[in-house]
Image (cartoon, rainbow, N blue to C red):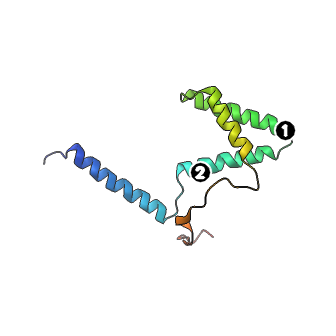
Amino acid sequence: MARKSIRQRNAEQRVRQQRVRDDARENRRPTRDDIARTLLWQMIVTAKQKKKRDEILDRLCDEIVAELVLQGFDMCESEVVFEALAEKYEPDIRPFRIKRYLEGKACTRGDQQ
């Protein structure tokens, strides 16, 4: 049996990947990025509600920026981006767009509400 060409393997991979994305959308499965954005927002909002707000936000910023620097990002630019997000994020205002394609879809699992 002859080995498939790179072009054919890539075409099959695109089909498989599209099926994975379609299934995730159909099942309303969040991506890693959806969870990461929500977690960061929740962490910043929670820190803002604490008594030592500035101290907690500074520590959170330091830890996130340190990790970004290890990945190769610029420290100053990373701090600027974090500070802009921290300034923007408020407890009563969710900064995320509604996923219109998820509206009106019922849960498929019996253990969810």
Establish if 95 lies above or below 27. above
Q: Amino acid at mark 2?
A: Ile
Establish if 105 lies above or below 19. below
- Packing grade of label 1 (10 A; few <14, some 14-19, many >=20) is few
Going 56% across and 70% down the picture, which residue do you hit?
Answer: 107
Using the rendered view, name the quadrant where residue 22 is placed.
bottom left
**Residue 52: horizontal and vertical position, in percent?**
84, 38
Establish if 44 lies above or below 61. below
Question: Which residue corresponds to mark 2?
Answer: 35
Relative side of 55 to 30, left or right: right
Q: Which mark is residue 52?
A: 1
N-term-proximal mark, 1 vs 2: 2
Q: Which mark is residue 97?
A: none
Relative side of 29 to 8, left or right: right
Q: Amino acid at mark 1?
A: Lys
Using the rendered view, name the quadrant where residue 99 is placed.
bottom right
Going 38% across and 59% down the picture, which residue do you hit?
Answer: 19
Going 77% across and 43% down the picture, which residue do you hit?
Answer: 47
Establish if 2 lies above or below 76. below
State the separation of the CA atoms marked 1 and 2: 26 Å
Going 70% across and 34% down the picture, which residue do you hit?
Answer: 61
Q: Secondary structure at mark 1?
A: loop
